[in-house]
Image: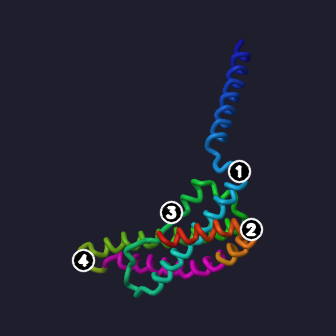
């Protein structure tokens, strides 16, 4: 009797899991058609291109700052969350995904170093007798941020070359979708 109940519970749980998986897949897997997936891919390419250019510009500005100056802002990385939430990464070719991961890894490292520099700057402002230990750590965080920021424009250029190659594989109508999305991104 015990084994019969255990077996019934197992198959009941398995059936419930399959039904839930089917419903989630049916209602939440967007886009559904091949055309919609390609359009999502093109818009995602435009978003990634825009955010990479903005991040590269930020990093070039960081490198141009005097050594002891800390930028008040941090790089924009909302595109990363958007690409994940829309599921666009599943449609990206491996080379594009590789460059995006490398780029965002660098950008997140710059962000963390700038945030760390902000924290150390607050420590430098504390009144202390003798040498302030935060001053040295502040300079190390800024140096690290600048070192990583120097790599971002290189990765941006590599991504741009790959992206141009991918866009050339699309038809005229699809290129128009990409160009329109690119234009809209630049107006924000």
Q: Earlier in the sequence, mark 1 or mark 2?
A: 1
Tag 4 near tag 3, CB within 8 Å: no
Q: Residue 78 got which mark?
A: 3
- How packed mark 4 is, by other alpha carbons closer than 10 Å (few <14, some 14-19, many 20 or more), is few
**Residue 36 falls in image quadrant:** bottom right
Q: Residue furthest top?
A: 1
Q: Residue 4, image x and y in percent? A: 73, 16
Residue underneath mark 4: 129
Badge 1 marks a residue whose secondary structure is loop
Circles 1 and 2: CB atoms closer than 8 Å: no
Task: Measure the C-alpha gap from mark 1 to mark 2.
Answer: 17 Å
Residue drawn at x 51%, y 66% is 77
Q: Element under label 2?
A: loop
Residue 15 figure quarter: top right
The residues colored magenta run 132-159
In this rendered view, identify the residue nearer to me: 109 or 139. 109
- Residue at point 66%, 28% (across, down): 16
The front one of 67 and 93 is 93
Q: Are marks 1 and 3 in contact (CB under 8 Å)?
A: no
Q: Earlier in the sequence, mark 3 or mark 2?
A: 3
Where residue 154 sits: x, y (%)?
61, 81
Tag in front: 1 or 3? 1
Q: Main secondary structure of the magenta part?
A: helix
């Amino acid at each position: 009797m015990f084994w019969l109940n255990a077996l019934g519970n197992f198959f009941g749980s398995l059936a419930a899991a399959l039904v839930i998986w089917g419903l989630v897949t049916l209602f939440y897997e967007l886009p559904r058609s091949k055309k919609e997936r390609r359009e999502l891919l093109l818009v995602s390419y435009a978003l990634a291109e825009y955010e990479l250019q903005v991040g590269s510009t930020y990093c070039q500005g960081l490198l141009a700052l005097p050594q002891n100056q800390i930028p008040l802002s941090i790089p924009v990385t909302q595109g990363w969350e958007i690409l994940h939430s829309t599921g666009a990464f599943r449609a990206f070719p491996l080379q594009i995904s590789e460059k995006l991961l490398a780029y965002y890894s660098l950008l997140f490292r710059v962000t963390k170093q700038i945030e760390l520099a902000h924290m150390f700057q607050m420590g430098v402002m504390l009144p202390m007798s003798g040498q302030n230990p935060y001053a040295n750590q502040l300079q190390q965080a800024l140096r690290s941020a600048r070192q990583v920021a120097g790599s971002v424009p290189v990765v941006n250029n590599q991504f741009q070359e790959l992206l141009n190659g991918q866009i050339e594989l699309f038809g005229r109508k699809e290129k128009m979708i990409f160009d329109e999305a690119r234009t809209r991104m630049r107006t924000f």
